[in-house]
Amino acid sequence: MQKLSRRDFLKLLGLGTAGTALFEAADAAPALASTAEDKLPTFSLGQLKTKKAKETASVCAFCGCGCGLIVYSEGDRIINIEGDPDNPNNEGSMCCKGISLGDANTIVDSNHKRVLNKQRVTDVLYRAPGSKEWVKKDWDWALAEIAKRVKKTRDETFEFKDENGVTVNRTQAIAHLGSASVDNEENYIMHKLLRSLGVINLDHHARL
């Protein structure tokens, strides 16, 4: 009787296991296929909700990837947003942020209809230092107040030269964090503005 080595034993065991699995898969395949086919759901394709909607090609604003979108609207109301299959960047797919774009303005109510999102902030809210109350302000007041405070901070902290006498023309009291919800052109304009003010603490949360 030939002595069976440990290596040969493992080889035979592996071959036997693989053969058994193949035979079982061959026997089970027809049954699984027929069972799955019998239980396939049937759908009655009625009129699509977007049939009468206006289609507008757009680009997702969440980051700089340039994923294409198809926005469906009725009048001034967006009813659906989906990926654009003709866009070479995403080929119709959407990430979790892109999928949620439709919920930024509207939500689906209990009747499965899109209505305006009541939780969306549409007004300027201001809370004075030390106060616990938010006060509604208009945009003219807010923009003027922001400009006034930026100028005051810049004037009080502007450095023409550093401690070594090198011309720096900067302020280190203001920082800016960019937004991936802003497109490249708007980010470029903001960058130019901040550089002209002497702001050097610039960053972007997507690091684009």
Image: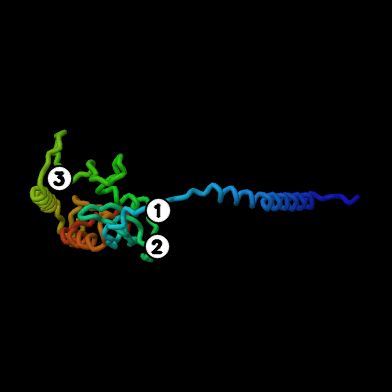
Q: Earlier in the sequence, mark 1 or mark 3?
A: 1
Name the kind of residue labelled 3 in the image. Answer: Val
Q: Is residue 31 above or below residue 86?
A: above
Q: CA distance from mark 2 to mark 1?
A: 25 Å
Q: Earlier in the sequence, mark 3 or mark 2?
A: 2
Determine whether label 2 and label 1 are within 8 Å by CB.
Answer: no
Q: Which residue is mark 1?
A: 45
- Residue 27 at least partly seen: yes
Crowding around mark 3 (Cα neighbors within 10 Å: few <14, some 14 to 19, many 20+) is some
Q: Which residue is mark 2?
A: 91
Q: Which residue is mark 3?
A: 124
Crowding around mark 1 (Cα neighbors within 10 Å: few <14, some 14 to 19, many 20+) is few
Name the kind of residue labelled 1 in the image. Answer: Leu
Crowding around mark 2 (Cα neighbors within 10 Å: few <14, some 14 to 19, many 20+) is some
Q: Is residue 32 above or below residue 183?
A: above
Please tell me which residue is depicted at 11% across the width and 49% down the height of the picture.
139
Which SS class for mark 1?
A: loop
- Which label belongs to residue 81? none
- Residue 202 at least partly seen: no
Question: Residue 206 at x, y = what percent?
Answer: 32, 55
Image quadrant in which the C terminus is located = bottom left
Q: Is residue 68 left or right of residue 33?
A: left
Which SS class for mark 2?
A: loop
Q: Earlier in the sequence, mark 2 or mark 1?
A: 1
Q: CA distance from mark 3 to mark 2?
A: 38 Å
